[in-house]
Protein backbone atom coordinates (compact mmCIF):
# COMPACT_ATOMS: atom_id res chain seq x y z
CA UNK A 1 0.00 0.00 0.00
CA UNK A 2 2.87 2.38 0.86
CA UNK A 3 4.50 1.60 -2.48
CA UNK A 4 1.23 2.36 -4.27
CA UNK A 5 0.84 5.79 -2.69
CA UNK A 6 4.52 6.56 -3.23
CA UNK A 7 4.14 5.69 -6.92
CA UNK A 8 0.96 7.77 -7.16
CA UNK A 9 2.65 10.80 -5.65
CA UNK A 10 5.33 10.65 -8.33
CA UNK A 11 2.83 10.23 -11.15
CA UNK A 12 1.98 13.92 -11.43
CA UNK A 13 5.50 15.18 -12.22
CA UNK A 14 6.12 12.32 -14.65
CA UNK A 15 2.77 12.95 -16.39
CA UNK A 16 3.61 16.66 -16.72
CA UNK A 17 7.09 15.89 -18.02
CA UNK A 18 5.63 13.72 -20.77
CA UNK A 19 2.96 16.35 -21.48
CA UNK A 20 5.36 19.29 -21.83
CA UNK A 21 7.96 17.32 -23.74
CA UNK A 22 5.41 16.16 -26.32
CA UNK A 23 3.85 19.62 -26.59
CA UNK A 24 7.23 21.21 -27.13
CA UNK A 25 8.00 18.82 -29.97
CA UNK A 26 4.59 18.82 -31.65
CA UNK A 27 3.73 22.53 -31.54
CA UNK A 28 5.62 23.71 -34.59
CA UNK A 29 4.86 24.95 -38.08
CA UNK A 30 4.65 21.94 -40.35
CA UNK A 31 2.65 20.12 -42.98
CA UNK A 32 0.75 17.91 -40.51
CA UNK A 33 -0.41 20.83 -38.37
CA UNK A 34 -1.36 22.84 -41.45
CA UNK A 35 -3.40 19.92 -42.78
CA UNK A 36 -5.28 19.44 -39.50
CA UNK A 37 -5.95 23.18 -39.36
CA UNK A 38 -7.18 23.14 -42.98
CA UNK A 39 -9.61 20.32 -42.25
CA UNK A 40 -10.84 22.21 -39.21
CA UNK A 41 -11.41 25.37 -41.22
CA UNK A 42 -13.36 23.40 -43.83
CA UNK A 43 -15.10 21.30 -41.13
CA UNK A 44 -14.38 18.14 -43.11
CA UNK A 45 -13.89 14.85 -41.26
CA UNK A 46 -12.29 16.74 -38.37
CA UNK A 47 -12.93 14.05 -35.76
CA UNK A 48 -11.42 11.29 -37.92
CA UNK A 49 -8.31 13.31 -38.75
CA UNK A 50 -7.77 14.45 -35.16
CA UNK A 51 -8.23 10.95 -33.75
CA UNK A 52 -5.91 9.38 -36.31
CA UNK A 53 -3.11 11.85 -35.58
CA UNK A 54 -3.55 11.53 -31.80
CA UNK A 55 -3.79 7.72 -31.81
CA UNK A 56 -0.81 7.39 -34.18
CA UNK A 57 1.27 9.54 -31.83
CA UNK A 58 0.14 7.51 -28.79
CA UNK A 59 1.08 4.22 -30.48
CA UNK A 60 4.48 5.53 -31.55
CA UNK A 61 5.16 6.94 -28.07
CA UNK A 62 4.18 3.67 -26.39
CA UNK A 63 6.27 1.64 -28.82
CA UNK A 64 9.21 3.94 -28.23
CA UNK A 65 8.96 3.79 -24.44
CA UNK A 66 8.46 0.01 -24.29
CA UNK A 67 11.13 -0.70 -26.87
CA UNK A 68 13.70 1.61 -25.34
CA UNK A 69 12.88 0.31 -21.85
CA UNK A 70 13.69 -3.22 -23.00
CA UNK A 71 16.88 -2.08 -24.71
CA UNK A 72 18.07 -0.03 -21.71
CA UNK A 73 17.09 -2.48 -18.98
CA UNK A 74 20.59 -3.90 -18.57
CA UNK A 75 22.59 -1.01 -20.05
CA UNK A 76 22.92 1.88 -17.56
CA UNK A 77 25.85 3.27 -19.56
CA UNK A 78 23.74 3.50 -22.72
CA UNK A 79 20.88 4.99 -20.70
CA UNK A 80 23.18 7.75 -19.45
CA UNK A 81 24.54 8.39 -22.94
CA UNK A 82 21.01 8.66 -24.35
CA UNK A 83 19.98 10.97 -21.52
CA UNK A 84 22.88 13.29 -22.32
CA UNK A 85 22.19 13.06 -26.05
CA UNK A 86 18.54 13.86 -25.39
CA UNK A 87 19.53 16.81 -23.22
CA UNK A 88 21.77 18.13 -25.99
CA UNK A 89 18.98 17.70 -28.54
CA UNK A 90 16.46 19.51 -26.36
CA UNK A 91 18.93 22.32 -25.64
CA UNK A 92 19.48 22.85 -29.37
CA UNK A 93 15.74 22.53 -30.05
CA UNK A 94 15.07 25.14 -27.38
CA UNK A 95 17.65 27.47 -28.88
CA UNK A 96 16.04 27.08 -32.32
CA UNK A 97 12.62 27.84 -30.83
CA UNK A 98 13.98 30.99 -29.19
CA UNK A 99 15.59 31.98 -32.47
CA UNK A 100 12.24 31.45 -34.23
CA UNK A 101 10.68 33.71 -31.62
CA UNK A 102 12.85 36.55 -32.93
CA UNK A 103 11.62 36.00 -36.49
CA UNK A 104 8.19 34.37 -36.18
CA UNK A 105 6.51 32.69 -39.12
CA UNK A 106 2.85 32.01 -39.77
CA UNK A 107 0.88 28.79 -39.95
CA UNK A 108 -1.34 29.17 -43.00
CA UNK A 109 -4.09 26.83 -44.12
CA UNK A 110 -6.38 27.78 -46.96
CA UNK A 111 -10.07 26.97 -46.74
CA UNK A 112 -10.21 26.37 -50.48
CA UNK A 113 -8.88 23.53 -52.53
CA UNK A 114 -9.86 19.94 -53.12
CA UNK A 115 -12.58 18.29 -51.05
CA UNK A 116 -11.56 14.92 -49.56
CA UNK A 117 -13.61 11.88 -48.70
CA UNK A 118 -13.16 10.56 -45.16
CA UNK A 119 -10.80 7.84 -46.36
CA UNK A 120 -8.75 10.27 -48.42
CA UNK A 121 -8.53 12.72 -45.51
CA UNK A 122 -7.28 10.01 -43.14
CA UNK A 123 -4.85 8.78 -45.80
CA UNK A 124 -3.46 12.31 -46.11
CA UNK A 125 -3.15 12.52 -42.33
CA UNK A 126 -1.34 9.16 -42.33
CA UNK A 127 1.10 10.38 -44.96
CA UNK A 128 1.88 13.59 -43.07
CA UNK A 129 2.30 11.62 -39.84
CA UNK A 130 4.08 8.41 -40.82
CA UNK A 131 6.15 9.51 -43.82
CA UNK A 132 7.87 12.24 -41.86
CA UNK A 133 11.25 10.90 -40.65
CA UNK A 134 11.33 13.41 -37.81
CA UNK A 135 8.36 11.70 -36.15
CA UNK A 136 10.49 8.61 -35.56
CA UNK A 137 13.47 10.62 -34.31
CA UNK A 138 11.34 12.77 -32.00
CA UNK A 139 8.49 10.49 -30.93
CA UNK A 140 10.05 7.03 -30.94
CA UNK A 141 13.71 7.65 -30.17
CA UNK A 142 13.77 10.84 -28.09
CA UNK A 143 10.45 10.58 -26.24
CA UNK A 144 10.87 6.81 -26.01
CA UNK A 145 14.34 6.99 -24.47
CA UNK A 146 13.28 9.63 -21.93
CA UNK A 147 10.14 7.71 -21.00
CA UNK A 148 12.08 4.46 -20.69
CA UNK A 149 14.27 5.99 -17.99
CA UNK A 150 11.29 6.60 -15.72
CA UNK A 151 10.61 4.03 -12.99
CA UNK A 152 8.70 1.07 -14.41
CA UNK A 153 5.62 1.90 -12.31
CA UNK A 154 5.49 5.44 -13.74
CA UNK A 155 6.13 4.85 -17.43
CA UNK A 156 2.42 4.56 -18.11
CA UNK A 157 1.93 8.04 -16.65
CA UNK A 158 4.65 9.42 -18.90
CA UNK A 159 3.01 7.84 -21.96
CA UNK A 160 -0.36 9.18 -20.82
CA UNK A 161 1.04 12.70 -20.47
CA UNK A 162 2.75 12.65 -23.86
CA UNK A 163 -0.32 11.17 -25.55
CA UNK A 164 -2.60 13.72 -23.89
CA UNK A 165 -0.47 16.49 -25.36
CA UNK A 166 -1.05 15.15 -28.88
CA UNK A 167 -4.80 14.74 -28.33
CA UNK A 168 -5.16 18.25 -26.88
CA UNK A 169 -3.06 19.92 -29.57
CA UNK A 170 -4.67 18.23 -32.55
CA UNK A 171 -8.10 18.72 -30.98
CA UNK A 172 -7.44 22.44 -30.61
CA UNK A 173 -6.19 22.70 -34.18
CA UNK A 174 -9.10 20.77 -35.66
CA UNK A 175 -12.10 21.74 -33.57
CA UNK A 176 -10.87 25.22 -32.65
CA UNK A 177 -9.68 26.10 -36.16
CA UNK A 178 -12.19 28.89 -36.72
CA UNK A 179 -11.14 30.56 -33.51
CA UNK A 180 -7.41 29.76 -33.73
CA UNK A 181 -6.82 30.76 -37.37
CA UNK A 182 -6.76 34.53 -36.67
CA UNK A 183 -4.48 33.88 -33.69
CA UNK A 184 -2.04 31.94 -35.87
CA UNK A 185 -2.01 34.84 -38.32
CA UNK A 186 -0.40 37.08 -35.69
CA UNK A 187 3.42 36.90 -35.54
CA UNK A 188 3.36 38.05 -31.91
CA UNK A 189 1.40 34.94 -30.91
CA UNK A 190 4.04 32.65 -32.42
CA UNK A 191 6.77 34.74 -30.78
CA UNK A 192 5.25 34.10 -27.35
CA UNK A 193 4.58 30.41 -28.10
CA UNK A 194 8.09 29.73 -29.40
CA UNK A 195 9.56 31.57 -26.42
CA UNK A 196 7.64 29.32 -24.04
CA UNK A 197 8.69 26.23 -25.99
CA UNK A 198 12.33 27.27 -25.87
CA UNK A 199 12.33 27.77 -22.11
CA UNK A 200 10.44 24.50 -21.56
CA UNK A 201 12.93 22.55 -23.67
CA UNK A 202 15.83 23.97 -21.67
CA UNK A 203 14.17 23.01 -18.39
CA UNK A 204 13.63 19.46 -19.64
CA UNK A 205 17.24 19.30 -20.84
CA UNK A 206 18.41 20.28 -17.35
CA UNK A 207 16.21 17.56 -15.83
CA UNK A 208 17.77 15.00 -18.18
CA UNK A 209 21.28 16.03 -17.18
CA UNK A 210 20.31 15.68 -13.51
CA UNK A 211 18.86 12.25 -14.33
CA UNK A 212 22.14 11.21 -15.98
CA UNK A 213 24.14 12.26 -12.92
CA UNK A 214 21.91 11.56 -9.92
CA UNK A 215 23.14 12.72 -6.55
CA UNK A 216 24.43 9.97 -4.36
Image (cartoon, grey):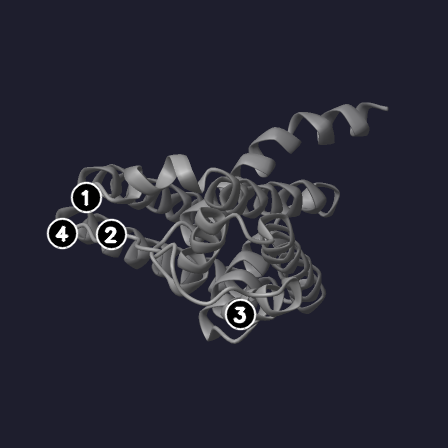
Q: Which residue is mark 4?
A: 103
Mark 1 vs mark 2, CA separation in Å: 6 Å
Using the rendered view, name the quadrant where residue 157 is placed: top right
Alpha-carbon span between mark 2 and mark 3: 25 Å
Q: Are marks 1 and 4 in contact (CB under 8 Å)?
A: no
Label 1, secondary structure: give it. helix
- 37 lies left or right of 48: left
Q: Earlier in the sequence, mark 3 or mark 1?
A: 3
Look at the picture and state if 27 lies above or below 133. above
The residue tagged with tag 4: helix, strand or loop?
A: loop
Instruction: Quadrant for the N terminus, please.
Output: top right
Per the model, the C-alpha gap separating discs 1 and 4 is 8 Å
Residue at mark 2 = 106
The secondary element bearing badge 2 is classed as loop
Across and down, in percent, residue 18 comes to: 55, 44
In the rendered image, which residue does mark 3 sit on?
Answer: 136
Say which element carries label 3.
helix
Label 1 environment density (alpha carbons within 10 Å; few <14, some 14–19, many ≥20): some
Amino acid sequence: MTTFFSSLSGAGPVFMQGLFLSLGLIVAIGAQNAFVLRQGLRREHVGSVVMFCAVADAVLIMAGVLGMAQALADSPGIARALALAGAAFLAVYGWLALRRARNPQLLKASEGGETFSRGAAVAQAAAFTLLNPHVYLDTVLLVGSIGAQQPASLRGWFVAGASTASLVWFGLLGFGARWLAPWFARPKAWRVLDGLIGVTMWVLAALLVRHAFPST
